[in-house]
Image (cartoon, rainbow, N blue to C red):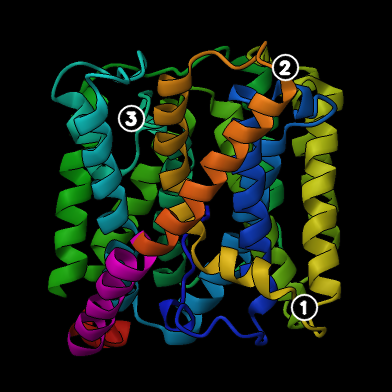
Amino acid sequence: MVIAPPDARRVTQPTPSRLAWLDALRGIGALAVVGEHLTTWAMPWLRPTAFNLGIYGVLVFFLVSGYIIPHSLERHGDVRAFWIGRVFRLYPLYLAVIGLVAVLSPWIPLRPEVPRDASAVAAHATMLMDVVGMGGVLNTMWTLSYEMVFYLLTAALFVVGVRDGQGLLPVVLALIGAVAGLVLSGAPLSGPWLAWASLAVFAVGMACVLSGRAVRVGVVVLGVMALALLLMSSRVPWFGAAVLAVMFVGTAVHRWERGQGRLWPVAIAAVLVASTPVWALNAGWWWVRPQVWSLTIVLAGVTFAGAMALRARRVPAVLVRLGVISYSLYLVHLPVLLVVMYLVGEMRWAPLPAQIGVGAVVLGVVVPLSWLSHRFLEQPMQQLGRRLADRYGGPLRTTA
């Protein structure tokens, strides 16, 4: 989102480096998402309406993931180690936050979009909630579904040798999104069976990858499943395709930077993604109104391009540190905010000093708590994942 820095070894080195600008972008993205929720619940007078602050932050996360994840996988050439690292990077905090939400559920009810049966467990086990048509226990978790689809598809492209040197993949995905917006008002497939079917395929595919047996087959099957779910059962198919196009825009930019691709497909993909809500049948939310959606995309793109252009300069240390803990910040802030709002009640019509005070309390709790969860949960699990990846990983040719 996103959200999950691909190289955990940099986590303990928050000083500026050649990749510090990416951590800074993650810090900006995390602050934007926290700001969106904080201003919605506690300080509505501060919430921008010309663009969506939260989606802006998410798009920045997605561009960062697209920029670095394929490059990291190709550089190491080790699908098995990649997935070991991803599992230990993503799941420990994710599961801990789900447990926290479950504990708090007597006071803060689960979202109505979450099924009240075991299919919700199946959907959360794969992180594919949004692309099987279900809500996450926290509404921030929808982005993890698209991150997971991106990882699955990126790994599949890697094992079949597709590098997209022309940068056409984001254009193709943006075109698919444009057509889906024109012809689909909803997901063609729906029902709890999707969560169970995807869990079965996910479990078998990951077993192949992690066991080192039939790795190529497992990775390709997982990639095909991810793409099929994205287009056939995600809650808004055009939006899912657009999100994936944005991620692969980041990949195309990285290839262009290394002299391995072209930049013009990025512009075409951006125009297609930005204009799809104009004709999309399912585009009723305020933040996908054409002018709002377009401005949000432009701001995310300008932020990424600006950070990239200035990457040789010293990056503000506070943004780098926020980027290092951005995954914790992203997942932890909303439960804290919901608890505070439960305790203080409706704040939209509260006096301005009270709103500012509540905002300060939330930030004063969220940032230290995110650091603690990063320090004592994320870091140890990342270190364990690295040890296991070093022990059991290996080039694809030796594990396939």
Q: Secondary structure at mark 1?
A: helix
Dot 3 corresponds to which residue? 137
Dot 2 corresponds to which residue? 286
C-alpha gap between disc 1 and disc 2: 35 Å
Find residue 352 and report its horizontal and vertical position in percent.
73, 23
First reached walking from the N terminus: tag 2 or tag 3: 3
Find residue 295 and report its horizontal and vertical position in percent.
85, 36
Dot 1 corresponds to which residue? 257
Magenta part of the protein: which range?
373-391
Q: Going 18% across and 69% down the picture, which residue do you hit?
A: 210
Q: Secondary structure at mark 2?
A: helix
Q: Going 72% across and 17% down the picture, which residue do you hit?
A: 286
Q: Secondary structure at mark 3?
A: loop
First reached walking from the N terminus: tag 1 or tag 2: 1
Q: Going 66% across and 85% down the picture, which residue do you hit?
A: 16
Can you say whether 171 is above or below 196 in the image?
below
